[in-house]
Structure formats: C-alpha cells, structure tokens
Amino acid sequence: MVKPIIFGVILLSAVGFFIFSINRFLSYLKIAKPENRFNEIGKRLKNVFVFAFMQTKLLRDKFAGILHLCIYWGFVVLLLVVVESIIEGFAPHFSFAFLGSPVYSIITVTQDFFGALVFVTVLFSLFRRYVGTPKRLQVEASSKADATFILIMIMLVMVTMFGQNIERIALGHSEGYRPISDFLYKLFKPEGSSAMYEAFWWGHIAVVLGFMNYLPYSKHFHVLSSVPNTFFSNFDIEPKGVLKTINFEDESITQWGAKDIKDLTWKEVFDGYTCTECGRCTSVCPANTTGKLLNPKMIVTKIRKRTHDLGPVVTAGVTESPVLEQPLVPDYITPQELWACTTCMACVQECPVLIDHVTSIVDMRRNLVMMESQFPDELNTVFRNLENNESPWAFGANERNDWIDELSDELDKEGKPNSLKKLSSMGTADNLDVVFWSGCMGAFDKRYRNATKSFAQIMNEAGVKYGVLGSEEKCTGDPARRLGNEYLFSMFAQQNAETLKQYNVKKVVTACPHCMHSLKNEYSQFGVELEVKHHTEYIAELMEQGKIKPKNEIKEKVTFHDSCYLGRYNDIYDAPRKTLDNIPGLNIVEMEKNRDRGMCCGAGGGRMFMEEHEGKRVNIERTEQALSTGATTIAAACPFCMTMMTDGIKEKGKTEEVKIKDISEIVLESLK
C-alpha cells in the first residue's frame, strides 16, 4: 500500500500545482477587456477540428508540418499510455487488456508505432534546432533552451514508455502485440527486473507530471492553449479583417485604442500565450522581409511578456510599482514597429493557431493616433485632407465628377450610348442593376481614372444600367481606420451609410478592394447591408452570361498581382484569373508568390501615404518578383497596387519594356 499512498500524494500535489498555475493564468486574462466569443458554437468546433486537430495551417509548409503532426498525434494517441500508467499507480499491474486481445493489440501496436515515430521526429527536430536551422526558427538563447528542454522531455516520455514495455516483456507480463518493443527487447536482451520496471514507471510518471507543470511557464503553453484559441478565434465566424468599432458617444470610455494590456481584449492577450514562436508569420511579413523592425511574432510575444510582468502586480492589488509605469506601448512595443505594418494579413494567414496580429497592431495604432497624437509626419496631411476634402488628397468633392464628364465626352465622340446615371438625378437606385463606387483613387488619380472609365465602358458594352454617386460619394474611411484614426472612419461610414440608405442602394460594384472590404464587411456596423462585388467578379459574371465577349487577340505575357484586400481579406482569387483566361492571345504566368501566398505591394494599412525609411521598399521587392516571370504586362486589380507597381517599374527602369494595366483595361482592349 506504500506505492499508492506515495503516488497519490505526488499526483494530487502535481494536479494541485497545475490548477494553481492555470488559475493564475486566468486571473491575468481578467486584466484585459471582456469579449463574447461563445457565438456560433458549431463553426468554432469545426475550426478546432480543421486547424487544431488536423493542423491544416501547419501543413502549408509540408516538411515542418508533417514533423509537427507526427509529434502532435503521437501525443494524442499516447495519452492512453499515460492514463494506464496513472491507474497502475493505484492498482499494480493494471492494463486495458480487459478490453480483449484484439482490441488491446490494436492499442499496443498503435502506441508502439507512434512512440517510435515521435522519438525519431524529436531527434530530427533537435538536430534541426542546432544544424541548418531555418531563419524563422533562429531565436534568442532563452527560447532555444526552452524548446530544447521541451523536446528532451518529450523524448524521455518515449524512452520511459519503451523501458516499461521492454521490462514487461522480459518479466513475462506483457499483453497485446508490441512489435517495436519486442524488437528492442531482442536487441538489448535485459534479464528482467521488477526494480528496473518500477524505475521506468516512476521515471515516466515524473516526466509526464513535470512536463504538465512546466508548460504554463513555457512558450510551449500552446500545447494546452492552441485548442481553445482556435475555438475562440473568429475565423469563419466574422468576415476576415473586420475591426471592432468604438462608441464615441459613450462618455464612460476614457481610453481609445490599446496602450497597455487592460486595453486589449482577453482574446488578444490569450493569443500571446498561444504563440508557438514558429516564426511562420514573420517569414511572410513584407515589412520584416524587406528589413523593417516589425516582427509579427515579437508583437505577440511582447504582449505575453508584458502580461507576465504586469499580471502579478495587478492581481496582488499593488498600486505603486515601476512595472505600472512601463506600458505595452512604447516600453515593450515601439511605434516604429507598429507603423511598419501594411495590414496585409499574411501573418494571420500563416498562423497555425489562428492568432490575429493585425487587430492588435491597429488597436495600438488607435492609441497612438487618438490618445497620444503620435504618428508619422506624413499623416498630418492625410488626416487634414480627409477632414477637409473627404479624401486623402487635396481635391474638392466636385472633382469626383470629372471622370464621369470625361467618359460622357468620350462616348459621345464614339457615338455610343451611355447607360450611366447619377443617383442625384434619379432619387433612387431601385431601377438600376448596380451602383458603381469609384473610390477616391478611381475618381482623382489620373492614371487609375482610365481604369475607372474602362470598367464603366465595359458595363456600357454589356448593357448594364448603373448609377454613380459622383460628388456625394466620400472616402469609405479605410485608410483612416487602418491608420488608427477610428473617429474619422466612423464619421465617413455614418455619412456614407446615410447616403446609401437615402437612395436605397442594395448592390454595389467597385474596382477598389479596400472600398469593397469596408462597404461589404464593415459598413454593416453602421446599419447598412450591401451586396458588394469587386469589378473583376462582375466582369467574370458578364462574360459567363455572354453579355461581353472579348474577341481581339492580345499577344502579351501577363502576370497577375494579387491584392491583399481582394485575396486574403475576401478570398477572391479565381475571378481575376478567369477574366484573363477568357481574353484570346494572353500568355498568363504566375509569380512564385501568388494567391494566398502572394506578397503585399506595400500600400495597405495606410502605408500608401508614408515613406519607407528602413530597409528595402516593399513595392520594389514585389516588382522584382513580377519581373522575374519575364512578363511584359503586370495585371492589377487594385488602384493602390497599380500605383505601387508602377512606381516599382519606374525605379527598375523598365517602363518601356513592362506595362502595368488594370484588368478592366485589358478586357476593354480586347472588346474594342
């Protein structure tokens, strides 16, 4: 009876300390703001299955993904071994053999196989940590030591398990079929000793309980937190990239944006504890890969570090401490890091545990802009123009009509009908097929204005009855929102929402993915529900319906640049490609980084209006990727992307050899 008593005390102590650690962790989460994440339970459970159990995000990097999958599922399968060993601590010689020989043999064979698989995988992972380590896994010494310790602990779990099995076989107590353990027994030929069996059993229990209690203090806490984090993620619950609103009429709100942990939501803090530090986010970050200070992984781990430092002080009720005077921004995370973000969501796309880096970054930008008035000098002009001119540029509202007048003149000269209508002259959009939202760049940018008119002419060719708001259209507010000026965004959203309601607008088409995302996914926060399509989607539909038929051959080698707000934000990858496929003569080639692995042009998140003072310019990097295909035309589907790629081509001195065209321009060229 001595062994069960001793084991019972050890087990209760270990479980008790583990509960203490988890309660401590939960108390830190309570420092942050509350948020309901219990809606759409079915979808959340699906996310757990797809991303946590099947690890589909990890398998985007097949080699590393398979390694991790082996370790993960090995642990899941071997949980039964742990349960068996724990019960054995109270009932000597216990096993699940009572389930019957066939069933138990399936269990033992599976355990043997996965035990060996995990052991070999851990050995290889240890080797990879020190020899030929990928850049994304090159971390500071403390993190490297932590990872090494965890891998050694996992290895010891396997060693002690096989040690028990070998001694069982030697003592003649083994039940079930254990092919690998039997092979090891024949290889080492132990005499069989009850003392050795007990040593392996105690070693196994000690490593398992020690591992369990080490996890809450390790970066490998994700072993415990990844499943709940995927459950609480809003992936597929809400449209991707949608930011939360601020109620500016609520006078009880004294802090706009996030300066410290208490200003983030508990889920944003939980993200910090779930980060596996795999570096996948950093490896695809356009800012980081071009030499900027921003490191998405470090943004998340710094949130965790701040929580670790602040948590004990706050939960202890301490009111005076140097720790309280060192907020998350700027003492842990610098403004320089935050302003480098293009909000392209590549980090979010790659994260295997569904961490949302971008929302936290914008939350911290909100504090810098609306509370601290600390932002790059270039943004003074942008914010002033938005306030005075209802666009990021110094153009008057009446100039939004210029492209409409130009189009009318061009159609008159060609003797073609014009099906465009101004809503102000109609009073309602009820008799229209769609309302065309031109966007600020579509109306004001001289180069992109041609794309605006090209799409309008395509609709004319197809006989589409469409309307425009003209000077009544205002900036959607996307640049302001991503730059952290939520107040300006809220103002534009409310005004535009009222205008859209006034004309009973239901269907909208736009050539700007940023406008599309705001109108389609974020304006519902302001009481207007719209069916919004990107112009590439609309053109593809017109082609499918036979309303337009490109006929002129265009013998060019074309590569398509995926817009982040079109692709990763709204999953529109096929429509632009289908449109190009329908144009005779085109030779379409893909860049190495395409679709959901495509690289940002560098303009998102308000970066369009800021200079790059660190490292290589993002648009130059992306332009070089496009040029490497040998394409003579780079097709774009976003005004921001077109501007950035055009600048890149100029910088590379390739303006004579390579052209940048919007997809609508290419289609119209084939129609005329």
Image (tube, rainbow, N blue to C red):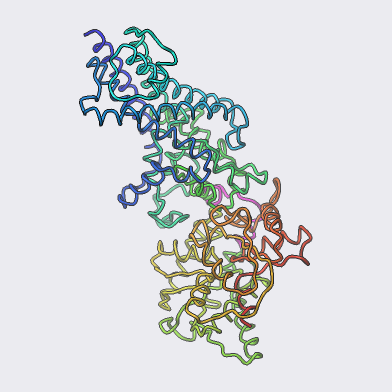
Residue found at x 38% / y 48%: 47
Snapshot quadrant of residue 353: top left
Snapshot quadrant of residue 562: bottom right
Snapshot quadrant of residue 110: top left
Work out whether residue 395 or residue 409 is closer to the camera in this orientation and state it: 409
How far from the left and from the top, in percent, is residue 74? 40, 32
297 left or right of 213 in image: right
298 left or right of 253 in image: right
In this view, the residue farthest toward the bottom is: 415
Residue found at x 54% / y 50%: 346
Q: Which residues are magenta?
A: 367-384
Work out whether residue 175 or residue 530 is closer to the camera in this orientation and state it: 175
Asked whether residue 106 is drawn in magenta, I would say no
User: Would you say the magenta stretch is mainly helix, strand or loop?
Assistant: helix
Check the image and report above or below for 81 versus 466: above
Quadrant where the N terminus is found in the figure: top left
Work out whether residue 576 or residue 189 is closer to the camera in this orientation and state it: 189
Quadrant where the C terminus is found in the figure: bottom right
Work out whether residue 422 or residue 639 is closer to the camera in this orientation and state it: 639
How far from the left and from the top, in percent, is residue 260? 48, 40
How far from the left and from the top, in percent, is residue 191? 37, 7
Check the image and report above or below for 477 versus 418: above
658 left or right of 22 in image: right
Check the image and report above or below for 184 versus 617: above
293 left or right of 306 in image: right
How far from the left and from the top, in percent, is residue 185? 40, 16
- How many marks overall? 0
